[in-house]
Image: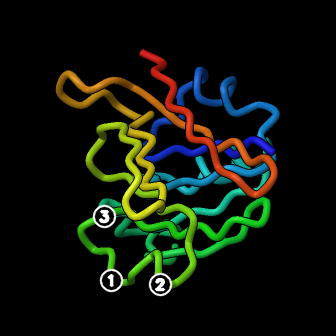
Amino acid sequence: MRIGVISDTHGLLRPEVVSALQGCGHILHAGDVGDAEILARLESIAPVTAVRGNVDRRGPCSELPLTQTLVLGGNHVYMLHQIDKLDINPAAAGFAAVVFGHSHSPATEYRKKILYFNPGSCGPRRFSLPVSLGFLVLTNNTIEPELVTLL
């Protein structure tokens, strides 16, 4: 299964993002959605799990949970927007991956065999950072991260 991972849309869902997410079995949005219509559009592609970011202060996005836990392909995944707000021990809790956003900078890192994955930002460009998204490819109870730069 291929899981699309996006973050920091800030109210902008680019056509390139919609195109890249086609065929995904699930989509994770790691916060700063900016407009609930984005989640509705993503739902037309695949089921969506989203968390609230620091800009999601009004309307339906303000009602998103701060964290989410889910099982994808037998792997436990923990989601939040700001990694510095992580208040659990992912290894002790049995998570295979932590998905986050906020920094607008794509990153893949392993800590104590736990994948920490930030897809970067696919909304408005910030500074000189790329417009990017990511994928988690699930096979045989493993997670393989993939970062894609769009612009």
The residue lying at 33 percent from left, 75 percent from top is: 86
Horizontal and vertical percent position of residue 71: 72, 70
Residue 24 visible in the snapshot: yes
Q: In this view, does 83 lie to the left or right of 127?
A: right
* Residue tagged 2: 92
Q: Distance between the residues labelled 1 and 2?
A: 12 Å
Residue at (61, 39) in percent of width and height = 135
Label whose residue precedes the other's in the sequence (2 or 3): 3
Which element is circle 1 on? loop
Residue position marked by numbered label 1 in the rendering: 87
Please, what is the three-letter code of the amino acid marked with disc 2?
Answer: Ala
Location of mark 3 (residue): 83
Judge whether residue 63 can be spotted in this image: no
The answer for how far apart the CA atoms under marks 1 and 3 are is: 9 Å
Q: Is residue 102 above or below residue 114?
A: above
Please rate how many residues cluster around mark 1, counting C-alpha atoms within 10 Å: few if below 14, some from 14 to 19, many from 20.
Answer: few
Are the residues flagged by discs 2 and 3 in contact, CB closer than 8 Å? no
What's under tag 1, amino acid-wise? Answer: Asp
**In the depicted structure, whether residue 147 falls above or below residue 144:** above
* Closer to the camera in the image, 143 or 129: 143
Residue at the extreme top of the image, as rendered: 151
The answer to whether mark 1 and mark 3 are in CB contact below 8 A is: no
Give x and y (percent) for residue 142.
69, 52
